[in-house]
Amino acid sequence: MDREKICSLIGKKYLLKNRISCQDDFLKGSKTNSYDSYNLYDFINSTSLITDYEKGLFLRLTTAFLLTQSRIKSQKDLNNFIERVSSINLEEYIKLIKTKQENTLPIKYEALNIQYSEKYLRQKSTKIKLDDEYLTSYIAILENYCQNDEILAISAIQLGIPKRIIYLKNTNLELIARYQNKTFNNYNELRIIINPQITKQTGLAEYWEACASCLDNLGHVYRPYEIEMEYYDINKKKHRQIFKGFEATILSHEYDHLDGILFIDKADKIKHKNAQERKEFRKTHNYNIISKTGDYLSLMNKMKNKKEGEVKNE
């Protein structure tokens, strides 16, 4: 597929994900090649970037720039590229370029969501080679997103990178509570989990989970209290580690993303609450440990049978 078709597809997909007043003007800008000789920094300093036409032009220049940075060898690579670029936060990217005064990565991406990208999110991510030349850029994209968003963790697939990478920002319940009360808001564990593999699941815990990709859905989900996992860190060192408690819940949630599974698939109850409503709700619905021992799947089956019995008796 040639560049003109790629730019056109990205322009159309961007419109689906964002509210643009003058859609025809935006599409016209995203297809216009008369500015292709500009680099992004020159362009944002020579135009107002106020009109939707100009924003469309900027998206086209961004697409052209990223095409020079990407390896597209198959239709799958192309689909991934289109999904990622159409999820760019243009306003944040403009600020980034003005600060660094150059065409630059990482770009601020918006998390893909089930309203527009459910099929994409449900694909199974592939392992990444530890010597992959884009691994550093992928991690930078994850870090950039987590630094600028109120989030506990993110999996790469949620930012349009279908690789088995997880970024952990905050898995500490005490600090999360303080953050929600606006007393602590600059905590970042900056832990990278590469090519994880869960080898054992023990115990049972419950929590009302939310997700950057699942809109305002809040779901009651059972997770293992403890997981044993093999993975590589940012320095390509292999680990075999046991994670317990809330940390295990967050990792289990993100690990599911890598297999195309969303928390709403596992939730036995779902409520619709915005971010502030979720904070208030969790003050009285905390993370709860049901059992620290026992096989997770066996405990889940017992819980399921118990609930089915309760329904029959009602």
Image: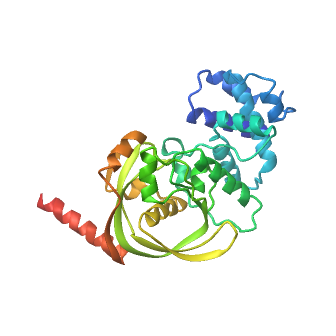
Q: Is residue 255 above or below residue 188?
A: below
Residue at the image point whose x is 39% and y is 69% from the top: 224
Q: Position of residue 165 (x, y in %)?
A: 61, 61
Residue at the image point whose x is 73% and y is 37% from the top: 7
Q: Please tell me which residue lies in front, 284 or 61.
A: 284
Q: Exactly how many numbered labels are in the figure?
A: 0
Q: Quadrant of the N terminus?
A: top right
Residue at the image point whose x is 66% and y is 49% from the top: 79
Q: Is residue 288 above or below residue 143?
A: below
Asked if residue 5 can be seen in this view, the reply is: no
Question: Is residue 153 shown left or right of residue 131?
Answer: left
Q: Position of residue 63 (x, y in %)?
A: 74, 40
Q: Position of residue 145 (x, y in %)?
A: 61, 47
Q: Quadrant of the C terminus?
A: bottom left
Outermost residue, left side: 313
Question: Is residue 164 shown left or right of residue 304?
Answer: right
